[in-house]
Amino acid sequence: MFNDLNITTELDADGILLAVIDMPGRAMNVFSTDMMDSLEALLDEVSSNSAIRGLIFTSGKDAFLAGADLEMIRMFTERALVDTTEQLHELCGRLGRLFLRLEQLDKPSVAAINGLALGGGLELALACHQRVSADGEKVLLGLPEIKLGLLPGAGGTQRLPRLIGTGKGLEMLLNGNPVAPQQALELGLVDRVCSADELLSTARQLILSSEPRKPRWYRQGYQADTALFDYHASDRYAAACQEVGIDAYQRAHYPAYEAILACVADGLRKPMDAAVRWEMDIFVELIRDPVAGNMVRTLFLDRQKAAKQKPDNAVKDARIAAIGDELQAVVAQLQQRKAKLIDAAEVQDRDIVLLAAGSASKVGLKVRWLTSEDTPVATGEVGLWLSPKGPHGRAAEIFQAGNAAATLERDAALQLAQGFGAVGLLSHGSQPLLPRILAAQHQATALGCSQNDSLLAMALVALADWTNGLIEQPDIVDVACVLGDLFPAYSGGPFKLLRNLGLVRVQARLREAPSEYTALFLLDFTLTDAFTLLDKAA
């Protein structure tokens, strides 16, 4: 029977083929090039083998299948800059073509969802004829691509609205939030919900009780519900946006909203083969858009890079003491996160001591709590600045006054940052970067700057530190600025904003800026040299 590196199979006496997806060396199954090779080979076997009467997909891991492979997404974004439309269709549309084959099989198929089914994982389940989900807190089903400035490109924008209704389908597509099994059942996204122990037996029952059939949208006379779209209005998406809660700012700055609306509005009036091709037309246009590239790189690729920063094992299990009355709210957050808290009198050399302004400690790994750019930090001392939690996460800056030599105190601050669920930025110099960017934002607001001028002023603060060698990885600055809600996600952060603008446009804006912006746009470095350094780091 068919077996390969990523999918193993077992054929039972009833002719039902159980396909277990279990990619070696990975915590979760994802769609990669070799995973698509495996799926294609499996579909060849199912199509040609008369002994196979039905097909069940499940996972050998705790999650079912979670989206796309990191390296494949990186490759897509790089190829989008140079490939022709036809080449991108061939490259990016392969998974959608495989799912069409699966959906159009003349043998019933069931997705037995035992964990997270996100992005391409849910699209695989949607391409099966039926779906059964295990019940449990760790089981979630969703299409989160909008949160990365993308759209589901393997049929998700076409099958989901047809399956659960246009309004609910658009809601899931445009907010990107997953649903739990019982909600999925109520929506009609899955056909059954059962215990994990009954998952495969329930899937088998569905296969045995099914005649070979395609989904209802292949039946003669089928018409999708398009009532939310006024095809003759100047804004044919207005009613749909009002229904889902998408505002004008989101539509203006995040092209993925318009792209998904176009996929659904026009795709629903096409047969599925044509609808999937239409979806890929829109996907190719979208992935070429700078906003999509910014968001994919900052919120996915660079965020993964930032998450790989690990503190020294010596501080991994350190206890934490906080000194200073103004840290009560911080202590409360640490308590919620089950941190090992101790009193100041109990501190030993390898414990972490979080210090408010003006506080001190003779022992422990001392970390100063920073509230603004001018919080006093002595040379060699390490400070921690933490952003509020934003729509995409949380950021922290681990700042070392003076030189950038690695110390256990810096590792202690990174451990604290990760304990708060924040992505950490490492910096050094005379003042921390992120609070100074925030101060520039406040100054720009006071001057009545447009958002574009405000973002430029903030980006120049980051560029100055990069030019002066105070930060090592511009991409992680971008991650911190977006997660910390200092920069909107569409910008990608200060350095991607500057790269997208380019030297000539930045120089022109600085020349044209009103005289009252002088202090805001005052530079202590040569802009040409800074962009040269930035280009080398790209």
Image (cartoon, rainbow, N blue to C red):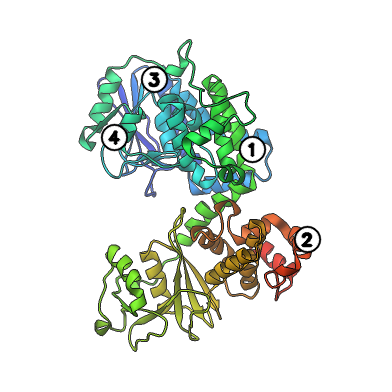
SS at badge 2: helix
Image: 385 above or below 44: below
Image: 60 above or below 499: above
Along the line of sight, which residue is nearer the eye, 241 or 488? 241
Q: Amino acid at mark 1?
A: Glu
In three-dimensional space, the C-alpha distance between marks 4 and 1, rounded to whole angstroms, equals 36 Å
Query: First in sequence: mark 1 or mark 3?
Result: 3
Instruction: Check disc 1 and report the residue beneath it.
Output: 285
SS at badge 1: helix
Query: First in sequence: mark 2 or mark 3?
Result: 3
Instruction: Check disc 2 and report the residue beneath it.
Output: 508
Q: Amino acid at mark 3?
A: Asn
Q: Residue, x 59% and y 29% (percent of image)?
A: 236
Q: Amino acid at mark 4?
A: Gln
In three-dimensional space, the C-alpha distance between marks 2 and 3, rounded to whole angstroms, equals 66 Å
Q: Indicate which disc residue 54 carries.
A: none
Instruction: Check disc 4 and report the residue beneath it.
Output: 182
In three-dimensional space, the C-alpha distance between marks 2 and 1, rounded to whole angstroms, equals 29 Å
Q: Quadrant of residue 234?
A: top right
- Mark 1, Cα crowd under 10 Å, few <14 / some 14-19 / many 20+, is some
Q: Position of residue 250 (x, y in %)?
A: 56, 45
- Mark 3, Cα crowd under 10 Å, few <14 / some 14-19 / many 20+, is few
Asked if residue 484 can be seen in this view, the reply is: yes
Horizontal relation, residue 229 to residue 111: left or right: right
In three-dimensional space, the C-alpha distance between marks 1 and 3, rounded to whole angstroms, equals 39 Å
Instruction: Check disc 3 and report the residue beneath it.
Output: 49
Query: First in sequence: mark 4 or mark 3?
Result: 3
